Image (spheres, grey):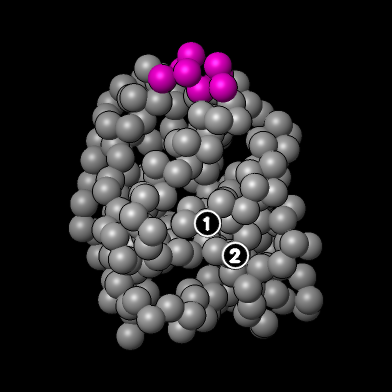
Amino acid sequence: MNFRKAQISDISFIIQCIIESEKSNSNVFPYFSLFGIDEIAFHRLISDIFDEDIEDQPWYLGNWYICEVDNLPAAGCCAWVESIHGVSSDMLKSQILSMLLGEKFQNNLPLLQQVSKISLSRKPGTVQLEHLFTTPSHRGLGCMKRLLDFVGTEFSEKHQEIQLLQNNLVALEFYKKIGFNVVDTQCNPEILRLNLLGDSCKVKMARIFK
């Protein structure tokens, strides 16, 4: 295995990581249920966002890390220090989507407000982990655990946080095994009724990386 920062040639794999992590082991793709954007259109949208080079949020190439097996990407994740320049990553993402989606974003604010009810605050100065994904053919090899170990050595900040849907039990157990603990939970039953996400509850987990 080889562990490294992402390169431009990894963009397609990174977008696959984002799409699969957004679905969170469900059949619900949030950007379709919220904005009517299918995976092909989302691929183009995220490619445009990466071209903008906006730091301090997960859709920025400089925040991505890759695990390679036999010279091919096997796992990927995004990591950044939250609010390092005083603006939250969630606010930046919202501004980016509002700018690029225009009326689609504005017309769907009521649905976004339902999703926002399970928003969990990100602690400034902590390392945020997001969009973790391992290809099915490389699962069970320890790729993600070792990739997260590598990521941990890249930051002087040792407090890490990750957010995921509560019913993603495989991921939840994996993070517990490597030292994460659940520190917060938010639920909104309307999310499942409206089929906006794969679950109506989100959890935040944290660990001190040694």
Residue 107 in picture, x, y percent from top left: 48, 14
**Front in this rendered view, residue 46 or 166:** 46
Q: Which of the image's four quarters has the C terminus?
A: bottom left
The residue identified by callout 2 is: 62
What residue do we see at 54% from left, 75% from top?
Answer: 147
Which image quadrant is residue 41 in? top right
Q: Is residue 104 magenta?
A: yes
What residue do we see at 67% from left, 82% from top?
Answer: 2
Q: Is residue 159 magenta?
A: no
Tag 2, which secondary structure? helix
- What's the CA distance linking mark 1 and mark 2? 8 Å
User: Type of residue at label 1?
Assistant: Glu
Residue 40 visible here: yes
Q: Earlier in the sequence, mark 1 or mark 2?
A: 1
| Left or right for 42, reference 157 | right
The residue identified by callout 1 is: 55
Q: Are marks 1 and 2 in contact (CB under 8 Å)?
A: yes
What residue do we see at 34% from left, 76% from top?
Answer: 157
- Mark 1 against mark 2, which lies toward the viewer? 1
Q: Which residues are magenta?
A: 102-109
| Farthest front residue in view | 85
